[in-house]
Image (tube, rainbow, N blue to C red):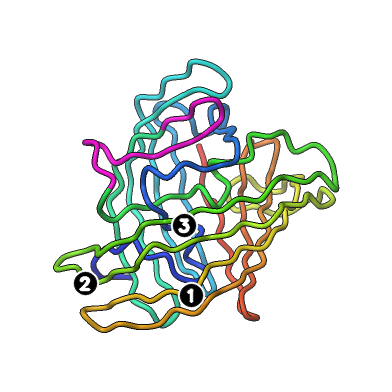
């Protein structure tokens, strides 16, 4: 997967590629997550219609309470979406969690440039305790401002709105996970929609239709995070999962 980095929010790639500085609306429980310590590490991989490889390392971790902490997040990410240009990115962000809300900011104070964010994957969400089958979590919407990215502005996408439907917790199941073996996990199911937009690639403007996906986040309480996300869009599937956490 090669090519200039572009923070491009298209089809199934949407859960992974978001604007820095945008706050997630749902609470975040990552202050107690397994990776939230100096030397913490995450590796994420995606297969199917979304191919992703990302590694994140955590340092400078400071904890002021159960829902208030901060850390420096560094790493790299690469992705490829069927038929569309892929990209690569170096990551150097400041993560802050305040009263359960997580936000990222590129270090140095800039919120522009190619950014890689895992919040919609649920790694930085679900601070609300997941306790029972049938539990419901509110939906939300994000508008992500995406301008030209990469050398010579090779890829661009105007602001795009993502609508996340109400999340419904299913019956707890034992699943195999790449990062932590067999785990008892809660499936959290919801729909995700994006409005129609257009993208420019080296000056060529391409229409991007409205898209609707069905998403399942597998939240594994013994690890304190979502270890796997399954996406179904127009009959095509993707699986994005944490393959290593320490």
Q: Nearer the viewer, residue 72 or 26?
A: 26
216 falls in the magenta region: no
Q: Residue 14: which numbered mark, if any?
A: none
How much space separates mark 1 and mark 2, taking CA atoms? 21 Å
Residue carrying label 1 = 196
Q: Please say if 125 is above or below 61.
A: below
**Nearer to us in this view, 49 or 147:** 147
| Quadrant of the rendering where the N terminus is positioned | bottom left
Lateral position of residue 71 relative to residue 215, left or right: left
Q: Position of residue 31 (x, y in %)?
A: 53, 27
Q: Which residue is mark 2?
A: 154
As helix, strand or loop, the secondary structure at mark 2 comes to loop
Q: Residue at x 25, y 53 (%)?
A: 113
Give the residue drawn at x 37%, y 42%. Answer: 21
Task: Name the residue beneath numbered marker 3.
Answer: 16
- Spatial separation of the CA atoms under disc 2 and disc 3: 20 Å
Q: Is residue 200 above or below residue 190?
A: below
Label 3 neighbourhood size at 10 Å, few (<14), some (14-19), many (20+)?
many
């Amino acid at each position: 997967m090669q090519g200039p980095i572009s923070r491009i929010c298209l089809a199934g790639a949407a859960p992974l590629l978001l604007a820095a500085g945008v706050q997630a609306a749902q609470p975040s429980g990552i202050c107690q997550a397994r990776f939230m310590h100096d030397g913490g590490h995450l590796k994420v991989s995606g297969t199917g219609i979304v191919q992703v490889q990302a590694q994140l390392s955590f340092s400078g971790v400071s904890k002021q309470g159960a829902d208030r902490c901060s850390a420096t997040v560094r790493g790299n990410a690469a992705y490829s979406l069927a038929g569309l240009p892929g990209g690569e990115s170096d990551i150097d962000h400041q993560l802050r969690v305040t009263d359960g809300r997580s936000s990222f900011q590129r270090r140095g104070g800039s919120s522009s440039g190619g950014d890689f964010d895992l919040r919609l994957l649920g790694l930085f969400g679900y601070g609300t305790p997941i306790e029972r089958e049938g539990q419901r979590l509110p939906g939300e919407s994000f508008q992500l401002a995406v301008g030209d990215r990469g050398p010579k502005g090779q890829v661009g996408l105007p602001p795009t709105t993502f609508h996340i439907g109400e999340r419904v917790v299913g019956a707890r199941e034992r699943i195999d996970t790449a990062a932590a073996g067999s785990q008892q996990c809660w499936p959290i199911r919801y729909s995700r929609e994006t409005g129609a937009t257009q993208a420019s690639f080296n000056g060529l403007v391409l229409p991007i239709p409205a898209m609707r996906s069905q998403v399942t986040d597998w939240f594994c309480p013994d690890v304190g995070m979502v270890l796997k996300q399954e996406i179904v869009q127009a009959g095509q599937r993707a699986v994005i999962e944490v393959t290593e956490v320490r």
